[in-house]
Image (cartoon, grey):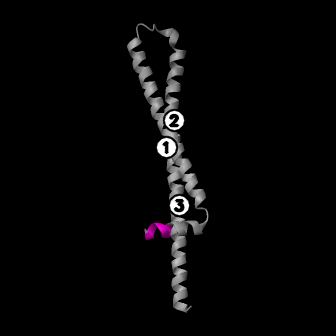
Amino acid sequence: MTTGEYEIEEQTEQSNIRTSLAFIRTIDAEKRTHLAELRTGIGIMTIPMSLLTILIATSNSYSIGEVLGYMVALVASIIFLFLIGGHLVFSSLRKIRGDNVLRNRCDDLSCLIAEFNDHNHD
């Protein structure tokens, strides 16, 4: 192998390593995004619990018959917020699990390089 061929091979290997590390950073960035989505979903799910606590604490101050319309709207909004929060939590957990599988599969740089090369040649 000549010096020029060796330098080209070394540059190609370094380029593959940089690409692999960029891929790992991308996976980690996506995981942070999904964790932020999980945090938001949990925060949204706590709002209905707080509203129910306020309703229970103040239930002696009003007659249910007089505020029934408000109660129905409030319960509907509580259910809606709980469903949105639950959706965010479960979808982010599913995405985090997928990120972990991909990250664990590609802990070895040679795995990343092989997958990258296979993907680029197809």
Rendering coords of residue 40 (x, y %): 49, 39
Residue lying furthest left = 69
Dot 2 falls on a residue whose secondary structure is helix
Residue type at mark 1 is: Glu
- Lower sequence index among marks 2 and 3: 3
Between 63 and 92, the one nearer to me in the picture = 92
- Lower sequence index among marks 1 and 2: 1
Rendering coords of residue 9 (x, y %): 53, 82
Rendering coords of residue 73 (x, y %): 39, 20
Residue depicted at 49% across the width and 26% down the height = 48
Residue 43 has which mark? Answer: 2
Residue type at mark 3 is: Arg
Residue type at mark 2 is: Gly
Residue 37 has which mark? Answer: 1
- The magenta stretch is 116-121
CA distance separating discs 1 and 3: 18 Å
Residue located beneath label 3 in the image = 25
Tag 2: Cα neighbours inside 10 Å, few (<14), some, or many (≥20)?
few
Helix, strand or loop: magenta stretch? helix
Residue depicted at 43% across the width and 28% down the height = 80
Relative to 94, residue 73 above or below: above
Say whether residue 59 is magenta.
no
Relative to 54, residue 99 above or below: below
Rendering coords of residue 99 (x, y %): 54, 52
User: Badges 1 and 2: C-beta atoms under 8 Å apart?
Assistant: no
Between 15 and 121, the one nearer to me in the picture = 121
Between 52 and 8, the one nearer to me in the picture = 8
